[in-house]
Image (cartoon, grey):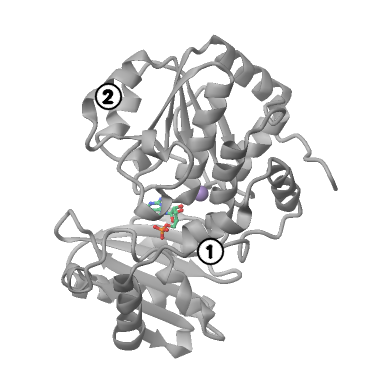
Amino acid sequence: MTTLAHILSDVQQQTLQQLVDEARNVVVCCHQNPDGDAIGSMAAATLLMRRLGKKATAIMPNRYPDFLAWIPMADEMLAADSQEEQVNKALAEADLVFLLDFNTLSRMAQPLCGKVSGCTAPRVLIDHHLSPDADCQLTISHPEMCSTCEVLLRVMSDMGWTEGLTAPEATAIYTGMMTDTGNFAYASNRPEIYVAISILLQTGIDKDRIYRNVFYTHNEGRFRLLGYLLYVKMEIMNELHTALITLTNEERSRFKVKNGATEGFVNMPLEMEGMRLSIFLREDTEEKGLIRVSTRSLDDFPCNELCAEFFNGGGHKNASGGSLHMTMDEAIEVVHRAVMAYKEKLKD
Ligand code: 5GP
Ligand code: MN
């Protein structure tokens, strides 16, 4: 396999071509608390639209964590929670809006969700989460793909837009594919992924440097906190092959770590032999009484079902999240109830 098969139907291709041809001012949005795939796909789509002669503005609900700040054009992205005037202006002028890396408008949170809902420009959704239900002129949803960045590259390939693909675009796309698969450690068995990577590498990007830019940027506080969480705080439910880690805001400030500094912690307990499920609870830094939940699993354990049933959330089979309005102690109780309810799938 050396080329990518088409993923767009003829109708989808024509619709997208027409929407882009007719647009002059394009806005590109992603989900709240953007990750590498959200920022990567947003950067690539914005740069692509500019290459096609459009005025393009990237709007994120809130700012990305510092370890993504080096991504091409990230410094130009507007944050809806702090740059209201510029965001309003961009959306007022918009005649096409791309929605990237989420399946439902509420994942943008307020105020951006309301602003985009109220904007009359046509919308195109490009995503890899299950069950898209955002009201859009065009929905390009591929849950089988590793990342929104992969979907975006495939769309670009179908549309002929990979002709002239630039290194900054390829860098941004590679970043999203790499971060959503833990550097191709999971959700990355499809051979097409490596055809896509080959196309990206041909632009001359430095994938080894991208890896270091993302993963080798941690400060001392993160490492001390990680040591503390694994040594002192991790609860292992051996019979259920499950680990639980919890983090309070008091601990966050004790170790002087910012939001985003705990990225990747939830994956680590799965490195213990036999583990099937890892759950990470952390107090929200802004909203008192809100506990954020992250879950990761191996093989067939359905994190998305667990999160939908117990944590007001959802996501992918092996990586899901949600939130609980309660104290940390109460949230820990919910976790214990949740894993007991799923004990048949967790036990041997
Ligand atoms: P994370 O644990 O990295 O915050 O989230 C992992 C995945 O879970 C995300 O990519 C997203 O698909 C999903 N997710 C996280 N939080 C929520 C939520 O509150 N609701 C839903 N439906 N999905 C979520
Ligand atoms: Mn993603």
- Residue hosting label 1: 318
Q: Is residue 150 left or right of residue 272?
A: right
Label 2 CB sits under 8 Å from any ligand 2 atom:
no
Task: Please give the name of the residue rendered at 46% of the width and 33% of the height, measured from the top-left corner.
Answer: 99
For residue 162, above or below residue 173: above
Pointer 2 and pointer 1: residues touching (CB < 8 Å)?
no
Number of numbered discs on residues: 2
Q: Quadrant of the C terminus?
A: bottom right
Packing grade of label 1 (10 A; few <14, some 14-19, many >=20) is many
Disc number for residue 86? 2
Task: Return the x and y of residue 290 as percentages of the image width and height.
Answer: 21, 59
- CA gap between label 2 and label 1 equals 37 Å
Residue type at the position of mark 1: Asn
Is residue 303 or residue 40 the one in the foreground?
40
Q: Is residue 119 left or right of residue 240?
A: left
Task: Return the x and y of residue 171 as percentages of the image width and height.
Answer: 58, 44
Could one spot residue 141 in this view of the protein? no
Task: Return the x and y of residue 334 as percentages of the image width and height.
Answer: 29, 71
Task: Return the x and y of residue 315 as percentages of the image width and height.
Answer: 47, 54
Q: Is residue 159 left or right of residue 299?
A: right
